[in-house]
Every structure is written in C-alpha cells, then in structure tokens.
Amino acid sequence: MQYDSMILTFGEMALKGKNRNSFTDLLYKHVKKQLAPFPDVDIKKHFDHIEVALNGRPAEDVAERLRHVFGIHSMRCAISVENDLEKIQEAALKVVRAENAEARTFKISAKRNNKQFPINSMELNHKVGSFILRNTEHLKVDVHHPDLEIKIEVRNTKTRIYGKTFAGEGGMPAGSAGKVLLLLSGGIDSPVAAYQMMRRGATVEAIHFHSPPYTSDRARQKVVDLAEKLQEYAAVDLKLHIVPFTEAQIAIRDNVPENYRMTIMRRVMLRIAEKVAEKRGALALVTGESLGQVASQTLESMNTINEVTNLPVLRPLVAMDKLDIIQIAKKIDTYEISIRPYEDCCTLFLPRQPKTKPDRAHANRFEAYLSVSELVDQAIGGIETVDVGRIQDDLSSLL
Amino acid sequence: MIYFDNSATTKPYPEVLDTYRTAAEQFFANPSSIHKLGGRSEELLKKSREQAAQLLRVKPQEVIFTSGGTEGNNFAIKGTAFAFRHRGKHLMTTRVEHPASLRAFEQLEALGFDVTYLEVDRNGRISLDDVKKALREDTILVSVIHVNNELGTIQPVKEIGQLLKDRPKTLFHVDHVQGFTKVPLDFHEANIDLCTISGHKIHGPKGTGILYKREGIMLSPLLAGGGQEFGFRSGTENLPAIAAFVKAMRLSLERAQNGGIARLRNMTDRLRQALASHPLLSFNTPSGASAPHILNLTVKGIRSEVLVHALDRQGIYVSTKSACSSKTQEPSAVLLATGLSEEDASHAIRISLSFENTMDEVESFLDIFMQTIDKLETVME
C-alpha cells in the first residue's frame, strides 16, 4: 500500500542533551544526501524525529536508501488523515488489510498528543478496534501479544496511523565523532572494525599497504571493493590511501631475523599510518586486531607494536569472538569480498614461525639495521589516494 | 510499423545496444584471466551482478546469469530434481506452463520422476486447494508460471509461496519471464526459492537471463566446467550481453515505476473497451488478475494465421499463441486447458504490448484491425 510519510526515529541520540541539535542536523544532512536521487520526497526536521513525505515514492525504496544511515533507530511508515474519527477508522482498516495477511490478533495503541481532540486514547482504541473487528473476518483483539499492533497518534493538525516499520542501523550520526584512520587489509576483521567505529559516529579514512608485483591488482581491487561497502555507511566520500610497500617489505626481509619480520613490518606500517593520520587530521588509528586471534595479535605483540606511535590505536574488535566478527561481516556485506583468495602484503614473506611474544628491546635492536625513516618517507611519497565515493562512475555509466 | 508482439520478444533499447557495443569492444578479456584486462572484465561482471541484485532486491550471490528463460526453467527444474532426487521424486507444476518447463518435466518423467500437472479454470488459473491436495511428503519442487505467456493470466504465486512456507523440503520455482517489470513480484514475500527471468522480453539482448537462486540452495548444474557463476553455470561469461541486459533491467524498471504499468493497463483497457461489443470477438484473457500488457482474443470464423498475415501486410505485428510453438499446426495447449474448444483455440490471436507502445498506436491498430476482420469476414463467407 502507499503510505504518505515515513517517520525516522532517533535511538540513542534522543538521550543526548545539549548536543542533540547538532546531531539532528548531521542526521538530517545525511538523510537528505541519501534521498537526493528522489527529488520528489520532502524531508522535515522535528524535535524528536525526521519526517519524510513520500509523495508517491514507495516506502521500500526510501527505506532501502536509508538502511545504512547511522542514527536512525527505526523507519515507521504512516498515513496522515484529518483529526476525524471516521477517517482515522478507515485509515487504520486500510493499514490492517495491507500489512499482515496472516495476523490473527491485533491491538490498537492510540496516543492523543492533541488534547483538544474530543476522544481520549482509551476510547479511541476501543472505537477503532471495534471498527476493525466489524470490517474484517479473522481478526481478534489481543492486547498482550498481538500479531499486529497499529499505532495511532493524534497530533495538532493531523493524525498519523502507523503501519510497516523498517529497522534502522542505530548508532550515532555519521560525522558526529571526528576522524580516524583505519588500517584496512583485505581480511574479514578490518572492515568490521571500521563499521563499529562508523557506528559511533566516526568519519573513517582508510590506509592500505600494497606490494606489487607480489600482490596483484585484484588484491588491490578487493580492498577498493571493501572500502566501497564502507562508503555506504558514510556521509562523506571515503578516502582510501594506498601505500606502496614492496620496498619496505624487501628491506625487512633482507635485514631482519625471520621471526621478527612480522613485528617490524607492523611497526613500520604504524609509523606510516601515524604520519598519514597527522596529515589528514585523524585523531586515532583503528585496526581490526582481536586478542589472541593469530600469532601477531597477542598482548606482547600489541605492546611492542604500539611503542612506535603516540596516537591512540583503537581496536574495536579486541575482545570479540571470530564468529561474532564474521556475523557482522556478513551483515555489512563485506564477508564475501574478504574471502576472495588473493594474497595481501601481510601474508607475503611471512615467517614460518612468527614470534608470538616479541618485546620492545629486540624490536628496537633489529630496527637499527634498517633505515626506517627513509623507508617510511619513501612509502608516503608514493601514496595513491582513491576517492571511493567517486570511483564507480565509468562502469556504472555503462550499466 | 506497429509492433504488438512483445511477449514473443522486444526490440532492444538503443542504450542497451550502446552498452553491448562498448562492453564488447573494451571488456573483451576473460573475467577469469588474472591480468589487469581480465580484472576490468571481472569488475564489470561484478558491478552488473550487484546492480541486478539491487534491482531484484536480492543478494549478488543469488544472481546466476543464464542464457535466458529456457535455460533458467530447465536449470531450476532439472537442477532441483537431480540434486534432491534422494529426498523425493514428486514434482508439481501446471498445465499452462511454457514449453521450456513442460518439456523439462517430461524428460524427468522419463527418468522416473512423478509429476503432477495442476488443471486450470476457464481463466487459466490453478486453485490453491488443488496445490494443497497434491502436495505429498516427497514433493521436492513446485514450479509455476507467474504470468502466462499466452493469456496473461496471473497465478496466485504469493499464496502458493505462503502455503509452502513451512515445507523447507519443497522448493518453489517461479517462471517470471513474462511478468518481470510488468507485474511486480516480491521474491521474499512470495517465499520463492528459484525464479527465472529473461533479457529479451524486457528490451535486453537475446541469450541473456537470470536464475535467482536463494542463498544456500545447492542445485545440480546443467553445465559443468570452469566453475563460473559460483560453480552453478560454467562457460565463459557473455559479458557484453550481461551488461546490456542489466542495463535493460534498470531502464525497464524505471519505465515501470514512472507510470509505465498504468500506461500499459490503459492501453489494454482501451483495446478491450473498443473490441468488447464486436460480435465476432471474445476475450480469452481474463479481466481480473491478468497482466497489463497481454490481450488474447478469439476471432470467430477467421483462422489466426490468416489474420496474422493479413495484419502483417499492413505493418501490424501480433501473434498466434506463443511464438515458441506457433509454427506447429496444433491449437494452443494453454487455451485448450482453459476449456476452449479446438475451433476457438485455433482462432485466437495474442496482442502483447511493451513500455515503448503508445495510445496512438493502439488507436491506429484498432482502425486497421476492425477493417481487416470485416474484410476477411466477407471473404470467408
């Protein structure tokens, strides 16, 4: 059925005090951007919700465009009628008929914000409920566990009758929490880490280490594809910084004992990331590490790696089980991309037995054999930045 | 020229042909090759699949590109039968399926499968009760055509899907070749496991199609080989055609959404209204629950071939029954199944419209059509 509006409710945002207006503004802007392809819809800010007037656009299409907008708790489809009992009854019946063919029980939950309206909520429940009973065949009232609940809100000028509800992403609006730089590998974890940070309102830029010709164009493409998935959650164009890492890896392979190669490689990556973060105004680094998941992700390893940077290194997955991480990866559609079998730079020149308990003293000693700052500067000089929000144009114009 | 034979095939949109040409020139490399050119082809293939999935509101991994409706139906039906033959040997379908389904079922009967063919009423529609009654413990597949290609009758697909909801061992396949873009169908709501669509019925290139296969269903492939299409349909991807087809999907769905379906309905309504009172004519397409673009009618006393040829000489193209079987002499099995006499069935023609047709064409068609049957009527007498 055709609803005339969609009400976007706020989750956690509604709990915020003084900052709430700026959160609402951010959310409003993001919603507006997402709905730009639908010039016919109107978007209006209210105190505790955003109202999208559909003007003939199917609710499903709008919900699809807003599915990934953080800060939306739910999207409730509604029809608006005059504050008139008969019109409310008719509209409620329409919603009941359209919404759930299998429902056997229902309940009306009316709310009367407009106290001028002569019928109070209890009476309205009763009057609309009995109208529906008279005009349907199989339905019964069940106020405790109804299959279908129809909410009615009598407002100042109009009454809204709510039907289908789509779940929103929840979380905090994009852009409400400053910028972070994500170390994006091709694996399952780092996109999930990015998602978790974005969910909290962080703006994410990503950095990826690429080692041609040992890693292929397809491995690079895989990361671009992952970034594109993340882009769907972002309010601004996501930037992906691709760092040429071959030279550094070869230098590490040639100068560092095998079992410390992984640790030193990570330390070099972090130094590069820190510099990029400073340049890009990011306040923290983010990795997809999870404690104990693989040899390099022990506390000893994190301790040794962290030594090289002053920036906070956020690890949103640190205490999560792999299976839970996979579940999120599937939900955000990155899993299928992450399991594509192309080699990335982390598996390149990998020691057979990486040190699971490295320490800072050894790491520093081995690094003395490398010209670390030169490697870092060289890598940074070769960075190629991809504007993920804008890349698909040449292919999508074909389609 | 007035082309009213769009259920047989449609004319590709010019934009679709542009895409075909560009993709054939620039994306000729094999998507499976590991070099850069192969990578670009793979990228285009991936984007095509993603866009198709988005338009169908399904997941990319649920989209299998095929060569069209015949392959889609064969794959869904035989692929299910072969993969689940140990689970059961009973299959269910209707009397009014497209030959691409019916012949596949006949092949399976020869291999020892037991097939129930549901009868239809005068409107060409099956009854839900019959479906219910025919379901057995060992039913592994129910396969139904959504919009009948000859009549335009819509089958109660959503209701059948609901009926099968708590039968995880019975797969539900829908032949959506005629309905796609013209009769909206929500795969999830209708609980569909497998769904066939075809490119050339929606202004895409010939030799293209999709079988939607719900994630997790392991069909037995018809084409074994290099493992393309997630291993379910081997063969180097026909990339230019796939990209062009996906473009046609987008354009057709856009046209449908921007009032196209209502325009089709207005045109068939106008045809009905203008032809209803003619003493020689009777409609075979039911007025309720039928597609907006198909009108099948019987012209008393004039054999359909004669009428088709007479119209064709005046630049009007319609067809006798389905194009795929119209070269055989027998009257349409679909029309006979609705209880039409042999006489009436062999005097039926099908008018089928597309988003490209206009009301002006409908009016010109009506003028010429009326004159033609008047003329033929006097000759026949």
Image (spheres, coloured by chain):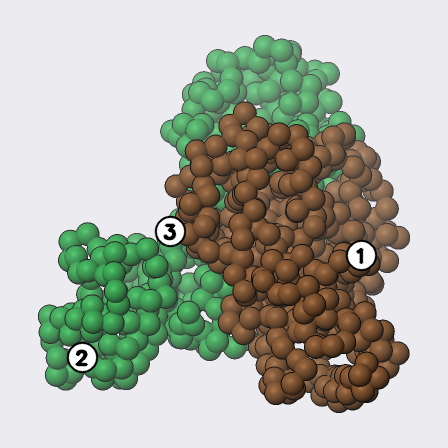
Chain colours: A green, B brown
For the residues labelled 3 and 1, the Cα–Cα distance comes to 63 Å
Secondary structure beneath dot 1 equals loop
In what quadrant of the picture does the N terminus of chain A appear?
bottom left
**Few, some or many residues within 10 Å of mark 1 (<14, 14–19, 20+):** few
Q: Residues within 10 Å of mark 3 (few under 14, many from 20)?
A: many
* Callout 2–callout 3 Cβ contact below 8 Å: no
Q: Is residue B19 above or below residue B163?
A: below
Question: Reading the chain from its start, which is encountered first: label 2 or label 3?
Answer: 2
Q: Chain of mark 2?
A: A
Q: CA distance from mark 1 to mark 2?
A: 71 Å
Residue annotated with mark 2: A114
Q: Nearer the viewer, mark 1 or mark 2?
A: 1
Q: In screen coordinates, is A74 left or right of B227?
A: left
How far is disc 2 from disc 3 in space, using C-alphas?
31 Å
Q: Which mark is residue A171?
A: 3
Residue pictured at 46% horizontal, 43% vertical: B134
Q: In terms of depth relative to the viewer, which is nearer, B372 or B219?
A: B372
